[in-house]
Amino acid sequence: MTESTQPPGPQLPARGVVKNTLVLIGISILCGVLANTFGPKQIPWQQAWSNQVSSQAEELGIRSATVEDAKRILDEGVHFIFDARPPVDFESGHIPGAMLLYSEDFNTYFMDYAMMLTPEQPVMVYCSGYACDESLLVSEMLFEQGFTNLVLFAGGMAEWNAAGYETERGL
């Protein structure tokens, strides 16, 4: 009797393990569908994301702005304009005069601006575009801080750039 000197190769999982895994995945999917169908807060199966951010803002009483509204707001010079995108995106190009107020570092950035703002101060918030909800998050945080005159520009930089409006770079 000779012994093999080669180590055993990789072992494939037993059929039972694969079968059990597939059953667990199926049960998980079924539970998710049932929870979404009969739970108190359903997630729509299909929805245009472009309307999602604006709809949620309106539910909070935050007005939505079109790209033309955003341009008018900039030209009037009354609103504080906050860019809710990450710093690297802000530095690569933002609406002129906008200030960085990234949602993940909201408290840090907000402290820089808090002394310049009053709760009635007109504020416009934007991010990358309709697929981005950072502007909604920042708007909600400002709302929680007591700000009452908020405008959400959901089209964000995507619409701003598509309209051909000027941008500025850097911090």
Image (cartoon, helix red, strand yellow):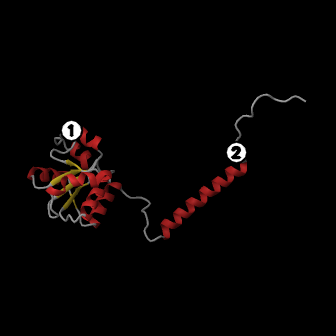
Asked if 106 appears above or below 148 in the picture, the reply is above
Using the image as rendered, state which of residue 65 and residue 148 is in the foreground: 148
Q: Is residue 44 left or right of residue 80?
A: right
Distance (Cα) linking label 2 and label 1: 53 Å
Q: Quadrant of the N terminus?
A: top right
Residue type at the position of mark 2? Pro
**Location of residue 60 (image quadrant):** bottom left
The residue that mark 2 highlights is 13
Residue type at the position of mark 1? Gly
Residue 18, percent across and down? 67, 50
Residue 132, percent across and down? 32, 51
Residue 89, percent across and down? 28, 42
Mark 1: few/some/many CA within 10 Å (<14, 14-19, 20+) = few
Using the image as rendered, state which of residue 117 and residue 161 is in the foreground: 117
Badge 1 marks a residue whose secondary structure is loop
Given the current orientation, which residue lies at the most extreme right position? 1
Badge 2 marks a residue whose secondary structure is loop
Residue 114, percent across and down? 19, 57
The residue mark sitting in front, 2 or 1, is 1
Q: Quadrant of the C terminus?
A: top left
Mark 2: few/some/many CA within 10 Å (<14, 14-19, 20+) = few
The residue that mark 1 highlights is 170
Q: Earlier in the sequence, mark 2 or mark 1?
A: 2
